[in-house]
Amino acid sequence: MARTDMPFRTATQLAKAIRAREIGCVETLDLYLARIETHNPRINAVIALDVESARKAAKAADKATRKGDSLGPLHGVPMTLKESYDVAGLPTTWGDPAFRGHVAATDSLAVQRFKRAGAIVFGKTNVPLMLADWQSFNAIYGTTNNPWDVARSPGGSSGGSAAALAAGLTGLDAGSDIGASIRNPAHYCGVYGHKPTWGIVSGKGHALPGTVSQSDIAVVGPLARSAEDLITAMDVMQGPDEIDGAGWQLKLPAPRHKQLRDFRVAVMLEDRNSAVDAEVRASIQALTDWLRRRKVTVSDAGRPDIDMDEHQRLYVDLLRTATSGRQSDELYARNKQLAAGLAPDDPSYFARMARANVAGHRDWLGANERRHQLRLKWAAFFEDYDVLLCPAAASAAFPHDHIGERYQRTIEVDGQRVPTTDQLFWAGISSLCHLPGTVAPIGLTPRGLPVGVQIVGPQYGDRTTLRFARLLEREYYRFVPPPGFG
């Protein structure tokens, strides 16, 4: 690979080049800092830097290289993280002006682990207000643009992470996901992202200031320019914190198969809960056709024995109860009054959200019980299939739209305006029942926008979905840089 391609090399390739002394750690850091100065004004993906600490760490990594020592699998690789991770000396605000002055005193556990693996953490990437949008804009840092089309969203809430990777502004990044917040930015920006099985990566230090508990459904996980990097990053991130680690250790099962032809694949292109644009369906169908030509066992009809209408209702209920703790006392009181005035049989997203925002614990227990009944159905499905392929979102990246609340906005699907919240269905496919979901780029639409496929696997089957993504990367399609960022 030519040295001019260095900014778009994978983290794995960068670490290899550093070990081979093809490039130094400080030189690599300076390369990305220079690109941020040149390209970041167009997309506003990187919103905070700690150059002094990063350069000190890079010099130490160069010294270790000269001595023949290795700091770990990410030795010398410059990386950024989503703004919502605590990084000592940098702000953690979640895009909320109420936390504008909050600066983290310590590193989150994920940051500690990345540093121990040799990564050079040098900055943070943008998010939407309270991580609650498929766009990435807020009153503190402004709007992040998609490098494939700056008039469009890079996704959210890890939109800055995906945009920075696509534009070649960082070597690796990490985000979080409760409603496709890793998966839809990876899809919109043409990079790789992994939503882990719930609970296998500690979220310690990824929380609003003052919060230490882990939320239901929410996970933290990596984004990268290659599936191989996702595998490396998951090896670094996974496992319990020091308290839980006193009692249990994580041992994920090996990938179910080594070769594509051995996988049993189910494909789900659309559902009545969420229409999917023809451009996205066509890309996944093209992948499906290719898999069949490669003698992979593929079923268009394979589905879990689940009422997907109920699946979606439960996901919305549990998602909104999981985020309800973010409400102030005043907002909670207003929402309680609002919910009381709704018709009991109102099935709309707004009504379900409003009720869930103020739901009682008994309501949550009932929804959780039903969720675990569905979890058994998913486990039975994955006895017959290894992975389920489906969309990560209803369309390719959509134009910026910051008017009103998210539940009031629409996107275009096959020429029709549909509620943007409909596509929560594709988030819930893996989120509701704690399943892993890996997004891998599989091509471009006729308009030149990236399309990714969501690869869903059994609970704790992270290595299987990651292996499938890695095989697609080797044999079908891999990351390509957006025009104008070379």
Image (cartoon, helix red, strand yellow):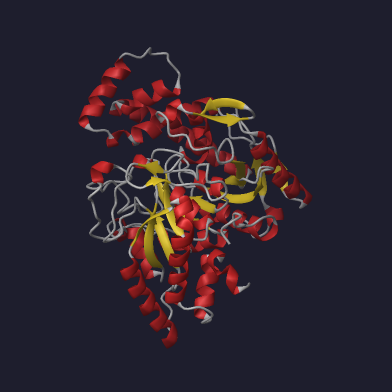
Between 470 and 485, the one lying in front of the other is 485
276 with respect to 238 (left or right): right
Task: Give 108 or 24, whichever is nearer the viewer.
Answer: 24
Q: Residue 172, how many percent across, how many down?
A: 47, 61
The quarter of the image holding the C terminus is bottom right
* Residue pictured at 45% horizontal, 18% vertical: 347
Position of residue 53 relative to residue 389, above or below, is below
Quadrant housing the N terminus: bottom right
Q: Quadrant of residue 396?
A: top right
In the image, is residue 363 above or below residue 240?
A: above
> In the drawing, does residue 72 fall left or right of residue 53?
right
Question: Residue 177: x and y, percent?
Answer: 43, 45
Could one spot residue 370 in this view of the protein?
no
Residue that appears at 43% across and 34% down = 402
**Residue 109, horizontal then vertical, whole percent:** 32, 59
Q: Nearer the viewer, residue 108 or 302?
A: 108
Specify the quadrant of the image occupied by residue 248: bottom left
Q: Is residue 396 visible?
A: yes
> Which quadrant of the structure image shows residue 52?
bottom left
Number of numbered tags placed on the structure image = 0
Image coordinates of residue 20 in percent, x first then y, are 53, 81
Q: Residue furthest bottom?
A: 67
- Residue 269, compared with residue 449, is above or below; it is above
